[in-house]
Amino acid sequence: MGLLPSRRVLSCGLALCWATGGLSVAGALNVRVLVLAAPQMTVKLPAAQTVVRPAGLAPSAPTAPAPVANASTWKVGVMGSGAGAHLTLNGQDSGNNTLYLPPSDGSQITVGSATYRGGLLLRVQQGGVQAINVVSVDDYVRGVVASEMPASWPSAALAAQAIIARTYVAARINPAQPFDTCATESCQVYGGISAEKPQTDAAVAATAGQVVAYGSKPASTYFSSDSGGFTASAQEVWGMNGLPYLPAQPDPFSAGGPKATWTLSVPLSKVQNAAAGYGVRVGALRSVSMTKVSPSGRPQEITFVGASGSAKLSGAEAGGFVRSLGAGSSRATLSGLDPLTITGSGQGHGVGLSQYGALGLARKGYDHLHILGFYYPGTVLSMLAGSGAGGPVLAQQAAQPLHADAPTSPSVYDLLAGTPLGWTGE
């Protein structure tokens, strides 16, 4: 199903040559971002803002205010323990284990050294304080795109990143949880106001409310830095099934990145410890080899032979072991033993959009719709229309499906050679 074997074409995918003028952007949908967890922290806010204690905090429906404190700068900590633990404000008992500053037009808060748009939820958690930024989805995306992709990159790449960042967090909104996402690489990097740039703000504004959808829900728009020339499926990397729009496929556009090719030498002692961490108990290692490889070039089985026997790691664990050795990608080969030499390509898990691939496509003249159509085949473009009890609601709008395969049509290389970009494969 890849570009070379099946002659996959770049169509106006993701329903992407249709107008969105008839759809309204969700204006009330908020996301809750865990921005800091610490024993204590400093919080700054405009002096006129009011703190409330929420009985429950949905993403877009804060509870009615019940003023408990006002201050411009707080030292926030915890007193007591267990169910009796309360937040303290400047050393004084607040009387509550949860405090909330609702977002309002133009509101900003500072937590530690970072300033964010929107409001703030403070809560006691395991004897410390969690600071959760409550912010509109698009203001959140403004702080993500420039943190995840250089603002100097082409506008098409930035627009694609804006849409998948919005989709990624929309898919994670869950009112039943205390927060929806975090601000680190474990989720998406969110730098707040200091990360915002005019170019990335323009990309967010130009795609306001737009998300990638599959089955009438926001898709799981995973992305990584560089696929190494072949994207990975969600199944091979994480053992996740039911995501056909995240396939393994050739990606000739991911070339020229700083991690296009690399070599890593790992001492045998580190290899032995890493293997033990995965439950491999074979005594002193004598060989480590990949005995099964996926179509994308990532390990599906690694065999360990040691002084007291042999063992295998299979599926997602095989790739996880390679990454645990410090490899930037599991698209790699193994050789030697002490040191174990890992020779690979790419950076990151390789599932979904490759950021250097998006850069390559943009430099070839393709717009963000083509970029998304290539990396998430079978999806459509939709709009956030608001929020419901279970999370975000998408606009009820018919969408043109992606033309994923057209074997009798021009290949992607024909398109790059000069076939007009408006060609849809029909």
Image (cartoon, helix red, strand yellow):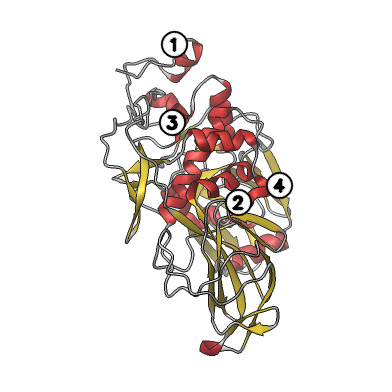
The residue nearer to you, when weighing 177 against 242, is 177
Of tags 3 and 2, the one toward the viewer is 2
For the residue marked with disc 3, what is the amino acid? Phe
Q: CA distance from mark 4 to mark 1?
A: 41 Å
Task: Choose between 150 and 352: the one closer to the eye.
Answer: 150
Q: Earlier in the sequence, mark 2 or mark 1?
A: 2
Res. 419 mark: 1
Other residues around mark 4 within 10 Å, as few (<14) / some (14–19) / many (≥20): some
Pick the quarter of the image with the N terminus.
top left
Q: Where is residue 159 drawn, in percent x and y?
A: 52, 33
Q: Which residue is mark 2?
A: 189
Q: Position of residue 44 (x, y in %)?
A: 68, 64
**Left/right of residue 154 with respect to residue 167 in the rendered view:** right
Q: Amino acid at mark 1?
A: Thr
Tag 2 and tag 1, C-beta contact below 8 Å: no
Residue 424 location in percent, x, y?
Answer: 35, 19
Cα distance in 3D space between marks 3 and 1: 17 Å
Can you name the residue that lies furthest to the top here?
418
Q: In the image, 415: left or right of 71?
A: left
Residue position marked by numbered label 4 in the rendering: 264
Report the quarter where the C terminus lies.
top left
Residue contact between numbered discs 3 and 4, judged by CB atoms under 8 Å: no
**Can you identify the residue that label 3 sits on?**
374
Give the mark nearest the N terminus, 3 or 2: 2
Q: Judging from the image, what secondary structure is the residue with disc 1 in?
A: loop
